[in-house]
Image: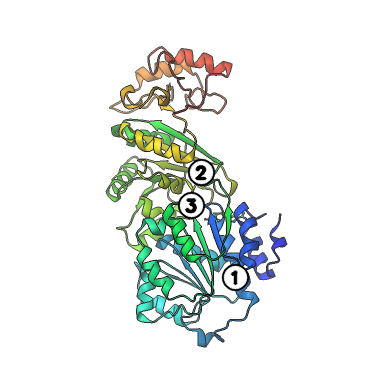
């Protein structure tokens, strides 16, 4: 399959070539012909699948292929032909960037509309003539109230990350916006998950929609390696610092549950000599944009984010995403790790899980439809009684000693060197290169004699198994 087979205008295929895309992703292969044919679309696709190009490219093609009914540019002040609604400023800015990138050899104009920045520059941009508006619901309503925007000419409406818009409580704002749109239009709804609320919304908005489902619903990209490190809450920071330094992680996105937690962790990682910034809703739009730009450019090793601030962060092929705390809504796990292993690249999703988060972990595994591998790291083991059921327990994988005042390395160094001399980061490598696990009922967990037995099994290649729960 190649991009040429869609029959897109040369201006668009040129931009695609310049973006370096060799071939369309599955969502693009399925969605582009349907959108070109004018169908409504209900698409199950998470961020990272290439979904933005899947709707922007055919939309731009349709705009190029038909004359603007509103007439010449001067007459279409504030009259977009396409409206994309997105839950967050970051996502709106990124979708607008994509529209500009793919449309750069055309005369089509895209304007991003979101809060947290001045109103007037947006009003000015709207009055210069526009084709595509990408907006968050709240700021869009402000413009409608000021009459700097009129939606009566919209031909295509896109709801991007619709599930997140509902989660964030935008439904009333969205209804007000829908009321301003023409009845006759094309509507495309993209969502990572399909709750009953999303289905209800789809039924009320879409007409005879075609459905596109690229990844099995509610599952994460297959190119992501998931790993759970059970660890006491009080040791998480130290473990994270060790993992970042030992495994030489760069461009690492770390999730915390709260803004306060994000700030604190960013400071602590900074104190450990790791270039880190936090982004969350309390930071100004400028600070967030700057942090994101530094992160994308590789000037920042770690970005700590809360779920809401991280929505729509678009960084392709992010190598590592860390859940410093598990989300209490399992769908958020899928959203979070949607930023790694993108567009076919391999990525790691690492979760540091304390005893009181085990119930969240079980919910996440239920949603994913498979268990996540547990790897206990020596020196950071969660006490057995905090690890949940027997089948959830992993066994301590020996790793490099951790040299801190609190955790004198000597004892561990002995164990590690006796057990895994020159081993891969001190870990016992099984077929998957991870630590081993205890089968149900197997004697001996993280006891002092375990490493010797483990290594023997690891060598025979039958020691590593994925845990079930
Ligand atoms: P999205 O799911 O829209 O957030 O896209 C995820 C990432 O994939 C973005 O960084 C895109 O630039 C990239 N991407 C989109 N389409 C392709 C493609 N056909 N080949 C390679 N990368 C792509």
- Is 401 situated left or right of 342 in this image? left
Relative to 466, does residue 45 appear above or below in the rendering?
A: below
Q: Gap in Å between the C-alphas at discs 3 and 2?
A: 9 Å
Location of mark 3 (residue): 192
Query: Could you tell me residue 388's position as x and y percent?
Result: 35, 27
Q: Mark 1: few, some, or many residues within 10 Å (few <14, many ≥20)?
A: many
SS state under label 3? loop
User: Disc number at residue 270?
Assistant: none
User: Disc number at residue 219?
Assistant: 2
Specify whether residue 105 is in view: no
Which label's residue is closer to the chain start, 1 or 2?
A: 1
Tell whether label 2 touches label 1 (CB within 8 Å).
no
Query: Could you tell me residue 258's position as x and y percent?
Result: 30, 48
Query: Could you tell me residue 360's position as x and y percent?
Result: 36, 38
* Corner quadrant of residue 280: bottom left
Q: In the picture, which quadrant includes the C terminus?
A: top left
Relative to 261, does residue 351 appear above or below in the rendering?
A: above
Location of mark 1 (residue): 60
* Corner quadrant of residue 137: bottom left
Of badges 1 and 3, the one in the foreground is: 3
Q: Gap in Å between the C-alphas at discs 1 and 2?
A: 30 Å
- Is 259 situated left or right of 434 in this image? left
Residue at x 45%, y 82% (from the top left corner): 127
Which label's residue is closer to the chain start, 1 or 3?
A: 1
Residue at x 37%, y 70% (from the top left corner): 139
Q: In the picture, which quadrant includes the N terminus?
A: bottom right
* Corner quadrant of residue 231: top left
Q: Quadrant of ligand 1?
A: bottom right
């Amino acid at each position: 399959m190649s991009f040429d087979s869609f029959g897109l205008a040369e201006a668009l295929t040129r931009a695609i070539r310049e973006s370096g895309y060799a071939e369309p992703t599955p969502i693009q292969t399925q969605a582009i012909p349907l959108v070109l044919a004018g169908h409504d679309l209900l698409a199950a696709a998470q961020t990272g699948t290439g979904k933005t190009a899947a709707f922007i490219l055919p939309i731009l093609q349709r705009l190029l292929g038909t004359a603007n009914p509103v007439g010449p540019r001067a007459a279409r002040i504030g009259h977009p032909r396409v409206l994309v609604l997105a839950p967050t400023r970051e996502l709106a800015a990124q979708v607008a960037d994509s529209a500009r990138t793919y449309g750069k050899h055309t005369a089509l104009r895209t304007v991003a509309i979101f809060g947290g920045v001045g109103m007037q520059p947006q009003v000015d941009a709207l009055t210069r003539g526009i084709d595509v508006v990408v907006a968050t619901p709240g700021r869009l309503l402000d413009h409608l109230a000021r009459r700097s925007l009129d939606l009566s000419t919209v031909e295509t409406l896109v709801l991007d990350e619709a599930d997140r818009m509902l989660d964030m409580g935008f439904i009333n704002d969205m209804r007000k916006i829908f009321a301003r749109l023409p009845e006759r239009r094309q509507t495309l709804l993209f969502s990572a998950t399909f709750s009953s609320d999303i289905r209800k919304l789809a039924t009320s908005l879409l007409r005879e929609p075609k459905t596109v489902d690229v990844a099995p619903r509610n599952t994460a990209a297959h190119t992501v390696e998931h790993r759970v490190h059970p660890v006491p809450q009080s040791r998480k920071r130290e473990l994270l610092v060790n993992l970042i330094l030992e495994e030489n992680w760069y461009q690492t996105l770390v999730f915390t549950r709260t803004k306060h937690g994000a700030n604190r962790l960013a400071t602590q990682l900074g104190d450990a000599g790791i270039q880190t910034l936090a982004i969350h809703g309390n930071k100004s739009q400028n600070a967030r944009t700057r942090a994101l730009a530094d992160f994308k450019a590789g000037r920042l090793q770690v970005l700590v984010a809360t779920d809401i601030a991280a929505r729509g962060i678009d960084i392709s092929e992010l190598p590592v995403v860390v859940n410093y705390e598990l989300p209490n809504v399992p769908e958020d796990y899928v959203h979070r790790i949607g930023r790694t292993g993108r567009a076919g690249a391999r990525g790691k999703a690492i979760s540091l899980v304390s005893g009181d988060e085990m119930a969240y972990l079980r919910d996440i595994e239920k949603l994913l439809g498979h268990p996540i591998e547990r790897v206990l790291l020596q020196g950071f083991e969660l006490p057995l009684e905090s690890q949940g059921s027997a089948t959830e327990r992993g066994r301590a994988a020996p790793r490099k000693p951790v040299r801190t005042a609190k955790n004198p390395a000597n004892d561990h160094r002995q164990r590690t060197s006796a057990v895994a001399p020159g081993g891969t980061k001190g870990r016992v490598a099984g077929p998957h290169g991870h630590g081993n696990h205890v089968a149900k009922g197997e004697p001996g967990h993280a006891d002092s004699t375990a490493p010797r037995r483990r290594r023997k099994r690891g060598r025979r290649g039958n020691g590593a198994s994925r845990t079930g729960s």
